[in-house]
Amino acid sequence: MYTIPRQGKPLHLEHRNGKRDGFQLANREQNGRMVKDNRNHIVPVVCALIIDSRAQVLVAKRGENQKNPGMWEFPGGKVDQDESEENALKRELEEELGIRVKTGSRLDSVLYDYQEFAIELIPFVCRIAGGEIVPCEHQEVRWITPPQAVSLLWAPADIPVLKQYAELFKKKQLRQLF
């Protein structure tokens, strides 16, 4: 059983124009009645499932000055306008951890509503291609397997990504994703 913080909820979306900014938040129920959501877009955020030779994944504990302080996540960050998802991921990992990565497969995105804003979390399976791991924004980083993940308190949007990793780990399919 995963520890799931009680904030936010999965999104219900309406699709327009087939683009990320073509998504809008749909009407949602609040206190028993439907209300129009006043946020106008979803923030694209990339994250990395950095896998080592034993199929462990690198996870990071959020800093005290970040949203969801002390919670664990897969490292990554926001995609800048006119930036590709893979380039954003490479930039964020170099800035946050001092490493270069080789990206593999993209996993299923997660749409998550944090009440004040909504994100599309876009996970990629990666390997370290160079550099030494030096966390700049996180309190701690560690290599884990799915059984070890159960004892960690996770950022809510990362939990579905963790479940994807656990399933791939169980089926021994991680190496096929590069």
Image (spheres, helix red, strand yellow):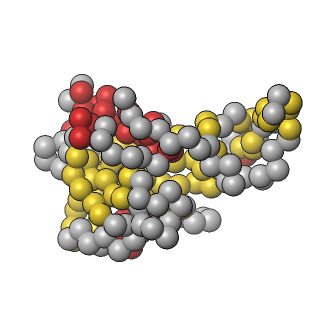
The N terminus - image quarter: top left
Left/right of residue 124 with respect to residue 19 in the rendered view: left
Q: Quadrant of residue 169?
A: top left
In the picture shown, does residue 55 fall above or below 95?
above
Nearer the observer, 77 or 90: 77
Q: Quadrant of residue 131?
A: bottom left
The picture places residue 63, in percent across and down from the top left corner, at: 42, 66
Residue 176 visible somewhere in the drawing: no
Identify the residue at horizontal 41%, vertical 58% (top origin).
70
Residue 22 visible somewhere in the drawing: yes
Identify the residue at horizontal 26%, vertical 72% (top origin).
134
Left/right of residue 38 with respect to residue 177 in the rendered view: right
In the picture shown, does residue 80 fall above or below 3?
below
The picture places residue 58, in percent across and down from the top left corner, at: 27, 53
**Which residue is the extreme one toward the left?**
54
Left/right of residue 159 with respect to residue 118 in the rendered view: left
In the picture shown, does residue 154 fall above or below 62?
above
The C terminus - image quarter: top left
Q: Quadrant of residue 133?
A: bottom left
Nearer the observer, 19 or 10: 10
The picture places residue 164, in percent across and down from the top left corner, at: 38, 34
Left/right of residue 145 with respect to residue 152 in the rendered view: left
Identify the residue at horizontal 24%, vertical 27% (top origin).
170
Identify the residue at horizontal 69%, vertical 54% (top origin).
116
Q: How many marks?
A: 0
